[in-house]
Image (cartoon, rainbow, N blue to C red):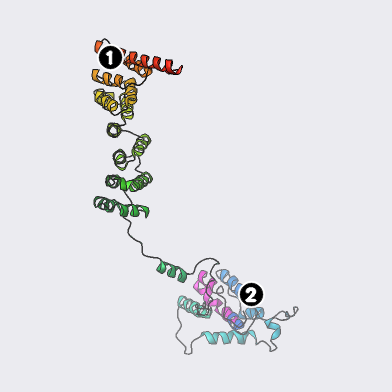
Amino acid sequence: MAGAGLPSWWALPLLRVPTSSAVRIIPSIAAAAAAAARGHDLLLLRASSSEATRGFSSSTSAPAAPAHATAELLQPRKDEPPAPGSATAARSRPRPPASSTAAAALVELEPQQKQPPVPASAAATRAYSSSAALVPSPAPASATTPPMKQRTGQPTPAAIKRQRQLQPAPTRVAGPADLINLAQAGRVNEAIHLLSQGARGNCKAFEELAASCSTPALKEELKDVHHYFLCSGFHNDCGVNNKLIEMYPKCDLLKFSRRTFDQMAYRTLDSWLLMIEVSYNAEEFEEAFWLFKQLKTNYHDLHKTKHLISPVGSVELIQLCRSGKARKALKLLEMGVHANLHAFFEIAAGCRTIAELNLVRGCLQRSAFSHNTFINSKIDQMQAKFEQMHANLKNKDGHGHP
């Protein structure tokens, strides 16, 4: 601290005292400044400042302290030797008397030319400005200030900038319009490639993509479209599910149609009728009739289903019998398919065992043709024929099979 300017706290009392007291205490402050300039200890400077502060606080009731009191404070005590290593002990030259020190300080503070006397307030302002000049100002930040240390593991701003420059520019993500255009142009593979890269699709786009897969050669593409449709969040849309049910049989994937129908959370009447139609067109008459019965029984709006007519009837039964599938026709007859007289005759003619013939007789008894003599006589003739064949086999082998 020795040899430097006054600290910043020594001029604070000047802000809280009357102007007249500030004028009276200037000699003491000047003496303290001169002592600090010549290397006196900080203790003596604080003592002078405290003396000045006491003088300010008591200026309204008591006169200012004489100059020789401040000079006595600046002189070291005789009974205490200076501490070794301090600035006071290091100096060998004697101190000048207090009066000469105060006078020299006043000479330094006063201007070179004498000016007319000024009011007390102006003198206090000039003393404050002079004392502020003695306070050292903080040193400006120079170029030698060490930079802040970088945290370990934290990238530098230059590295972050380089990383941003190396990153590729964001590409545009394809939307539903792009997928619809590709589907209508027949470029399903390109649309699936965009979906794999994160393209966004809506219900209309997935419906168009499914409709474009209408041949067995595009069965894998239709599966991919169904996969991305299930992952898109629109998996409960009835329109897209109905389109998938319709397109899977065209790609020879009828079982996928039924699986899609079974996994639907909500089925409309169109969904039921479409699934029945798909099964009927694939000549799966048994499944079509079973779905029709479920529709008539379990659909929530029975007013819409009570007038529906089964797609499977006598024509389908005769078709099955003539194509060698009389057993399927007989099973449909047992499930409750309404058959006419011609259908009963064809089914009875297609029976190969007495057991099958008995089933036809039972279904005939539950129908409106139970008393028809023509069909009853036909069934009796068929039964007699089977019994004769059974007897011949029994006589020849010794054990026949009914």
| Most frequent secondary structure within the magenta stretch | helix
Q: Which quadrant does the N terminus fall into? A: bottom right
Q: Is residue 256 visible?
A: yes
Across and down, in percent, residue 151 comes to: 54, 67
Instruction: Say whether residue 226 is magenta.
Output: no
Residue stretch in magenta: 2-31
- Left or right of 4: which side holds 393? left
Instruction: Say whether residue 25 is magenta.
Output: yes
Amino acid carrying label 2: it is Ala
Of 297 and 110, the residue lying toward us: 297
- Residue at the image point whose x is 34% and y is 40% from the top: 253
Across and down, in percent, residue 372 comes to: 25, 11
Q: Which residue is mark 1?
A: 378
**Which residue appears farthest toward the front when viewing the image?**
396
Number of the label disc, if any, that sits on residue 243: none
Whole-angstrom CA distance, mark 2 to mark 1, is: 142 Å
Across and down, in percent, residue 211 comes to: 27, 45
Of 51 and 303, the residue lying toward us: 303
Query: Does residue 26 sit above or below 393 in this rendering?
Result: below
